[in-house]
Image (cartoon, rainbow, N blue to C red):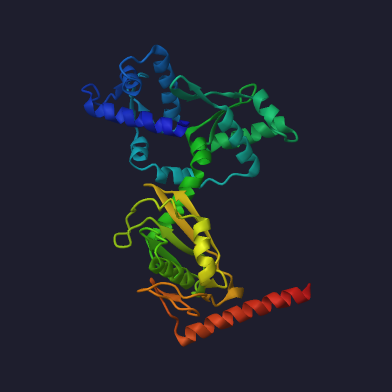
Amino acid sequence: MDYVNWVGRVLEKIVEEGRTSAQTGGFGLNVYDIAKAVHGPGATNSQTIGLNRLFAEMKDAGLLLETNSDVFYKPSYTGRSILKDPVPYWQAVCEEKLESDQGELLHLVNRLSPRVSGDNITLDWVELTQLLADLDWPDKDERLRTVGRELGGRGLAKCLCLGSLQLKASYQGLVWETRRGFTLEAKFIDGLVAEWETTSVEFKRELSLNPADRQAKFVKDLLGLANTQASGRRWMVVGFSEKTRAYHGPPDHKVSQNRIEQILSPYTTPNVEVRYEVVDYRAGKVGKLEVLRDARKLPYRVAKSVGDKKRIEEGQVFVRHGSQTEAPTPAELQAIVEEGERARLHLEADRTSL
């Protein structure tokens, strides 16, 4: 468990205990009762002290409110929102753009600051000497102060500049580093779901590559994405109900980049190239397949007949009409052929000019 997960677990315990405790009222929960909720009835004094440190950090992040005295706490509106769905908050944090030196220093502080003590995770101050030893910067003493203040000003680290510089990781800074890939991926997929199926995006409940009829349908769908004249990149997203748009479940673990290439290689000409990966999403894992369209290869055709009831024949070309994959009209086919010819002529012209 990392620090971000630990904060989420403690928040969850505070809310659960608050629902059952008669003492909450407007005062929040006593720190000792929170310690029992988190660590069990036998919570030790050191565990309680560790939680007190964590509560100070959670207050700094705006996740907890201190009520009446420094031993009563309750979740803030932000804290409760994160418990319901952390992604919007994480996305807002992860949209911060960092310069390379800011990112390097943040990574270092995030590595050195978290401390695991028993079953508590807290954040310690990182001394200037530790930072200087790990950074290969010119004039790094002054630069450290400047970049440290910049991170502190944006809430991505805590900066103490009285005398010798000290830096400490923050919840926001750790979210930026450890949840950035997840939140940006979730935002991207959310955008695709909002638009739903278009000429360049297709959703699948699941991706089954056997028997031959399903292989034929898969090849047909990818040929349609590859041939269609639409701007932007082309995607097939696996794991959503095609009727409700709701998340259905993770893709079959047997589906892989290698397995997809094994199917496309004998049945597409020129070979349709793809990039497939399984990524984390809000409710679970999602399969994300990108069709790497190369205009110089147009048109992409069926290389060999496959299928029974849903058979596709050698030489066929497919395009997408909205959310449907169909044979192109004569005019569409001519436009695709001409696009391929232009792309090949441009390539030849570029080679000649070298």
The reply, left or right, for residue 268 in relation to residue 21 is right
Q: Nearer the viewer, residue 288 or 36?
A: 288
User: Where residue 44 sits in the image (x, y, percent)?
Assistant: 38, 13
The reply, left or right, for residue 9 in relation to residue 173 is left
Q: In the picture shown, does residue 13 fall above or below 335?
A: above
Q: Nearer the viewer, residue 316 or 30?
A: 316
Q: Nearer the viewer, residue 164 or 120?
A: 120
State the residue lying farthest toward the right: 354
Image quadrant containing the C terminus: bottom right
**Visible residue check, residue 155:** no
Q: Nearer the viewer, residue 135 or 314?
A: 314
The number of numbered badges drawn on the structure is: 0
The reply, left or right, for residue 146 in relation to residue 299 is right
State the residue lying farthest toward the top: 45
User: Where residue 15 sits in the image (x, y, percent)?
Assistant: 29, 30
State the residue at coordinates (71%, 29%): 141
Which of the 4 image quadrants contains residue 203?
Answer: bottom left
Q: In the picture shown, does residue 347 fall above or below 276?
A: below
User: Where residue 50 sits in the image (x, y, percent)?
Assistant: 44, 19
State the residue at coordinates (65%, 28%): 131
State the residue at coordinates (45%, 27%): 57
State the residue at coordinates (39%, 60%): 208
Q: In the picture shown, does residue 266 fall above or below 157?
A: below
User: Where residue 64 sits in the image (x, y, percent)?
Assistant: 37, 30
